[in-house]
Structure formats: structure tokens, C-alpha cells
Image (spheres, rainbow, N blue to C red):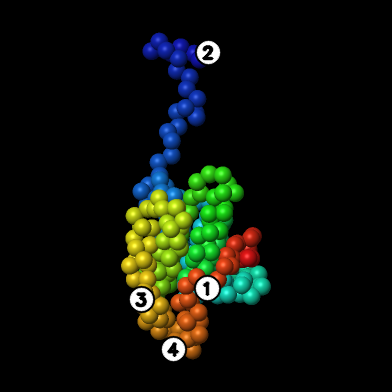
Amino acid sequence: MGWVGARGYDERVSTAAATPPPVHPPFAQTKYQVRFDWGVAGAGRVETADVAVVVDVLHATTSVEQRVSGGEAVAVAELDDRGETAQIATLLADAGATVVAGCLRNRSAVADWIIAKQAELGRRTSIVVIAVGELDDTAETRFAVEDLFGAGAVIEALGLRGIDFTSPEAAAAAAAYEGLRNGVGHLLSASATAQQLAQAGATRHVQAAREVDVSSVVPVLDGAVFRA
């Protein structure tokens, strides 16, 4: 029994009952199964998910896919920090997500892996896709079209497998890839990032990054190391 106050009714209210449910800001994209955002800020902004796909097409995640495909285990600390990929992967993992490295090369394999993960969990699996982008000269995240295509390719592959309850942001990324599918290779090679890499003599890396669905390997972050 609670005590009866001057107003004539039980005034004892438990803390749990008095605490309102959490309010999720719209930017968290909480109500959607598939969420999408950019950079470190975006990784911290979206609602925590079961699975997080980090996409850095012309830098880290394509390299991780190739190295893991070759039998290596790749430490997060080894990642090219040009676009803060390592920080994003660590942030998402610390928030409780299983983090995988996605790119154009393994986009269907990533989608299949998520389908298997959903079956393993026995419930609808929440997914956040983070396009890393690049830091500009002012240390702000620059829009990188290659990461838009990579993220959109993964999201589109999920949709083809029935995981299509996407946020507007995720749907737009998928539509960008789908609508420009036939020209993605050329557009990626002509992007500002690719031109910069070509000037540095990394043309072969750009050519590898533009290949779609050539790998069945999904690098998964295990502690501080990506493994197959």
C-alpha cells in the first residue's frame, strides 16, 4: 500500500512508472529496418542496429575485402584512416552491432550474410549502412559518390532479398545505384577520389573497386580484427 496524501489518493509512484519512454529523434531512423547515414557523425546519429555495414569503396573496405579474401585477418588499426573508417567501425561495434565491411565487390554476399544472420536470430534484423565519405581540408566529411554507390548497392541487394523496409535516406541511396547501375563503373572511375588515386599511381585499386559481385567473402569485425 502507498501512503495517502493530502489530496486523498495514493501518491507513491514507482520511478519506472513515472519515467516516460525514450524519445528517438527522427535522425535516428529508428522505425526502419534499414537505415543509412554518412561518416562518424552519422554512425553516432542513427539508432543502434543488429548489423552495421561500413562502406568505403575506394579506400578501406575494398582493401579489407581483398585482403580477407586472400586469407588475411585485418586489424582495424591497419585501416586507412583517410575517411575515418576505423573510428566508424569501432563506434558501431561498441554500440553493440556486428560490423561487416561492404563494397561493390561483395555487396550481394553481404546481403546474403545478413539474411542468414536474420534466420539465426529468429527475428527481424535491424541494419545500418554507413557510407564513410572522405575528410576534406577542413576535416569535414565530404560526399563521396563512390560510397553512395557502394552503400546503395548493398541496400538494393537487401531489397531484392525481401529486406525492403528502408528509411527514405536508405531508399534514395539504393535508387541512386539502381538508376545508374549501367554507368557506375565509369562514374566511379571518373570521381574526384578515383582521379586523386590515379594521380598517385593506384589505378589498379580503382579498377578492382569498380567490380560488382565478384566476391563471396564478407569480412566481419571480430574484436579488433576483420576476418572472413
Residue 118 or residue 221, whichever sits in front = 118
Residue corresponding to mark 3: 183
Query: Do residues under tags 4 and 3 come within 8 Å of each other at their CB atoms?
Result: no
**Foreground label between 3 and 2:** 3
User: Going 64% across and 75% down the picture, which residue do you hit?
Assistant: 70
User: Going 53% across and 56% down the picture, which residue do you hit?
Assistant: 114
Amino acid type at circle 4 is Gln
Q: Which of marks 2 and 4 is nearer the N terminus?
A: 2
Q: How crowded is mark 2: few (under 14 residues within 10 Å), some or many (20 or more)?
A: few
Q: Mark 2 falls on what kind of element?
A: loop
Q: Mark 1 falls on what kind of element?
A: loop
Residue 221, percent from left and from top = 60, 62
Q: How crowded is mark 4: few (under 14 residues within 10 Å), some or many (20 or more)?
A: few
Horizontal side of 79 relative to 10 (left or right) equals: right
Residue corresponding to mark 1: 214
Q: Tag on residue 84?
A: none
User: Going 52% across and 62% down the picture, which residue do you hit?
Assistant: 110
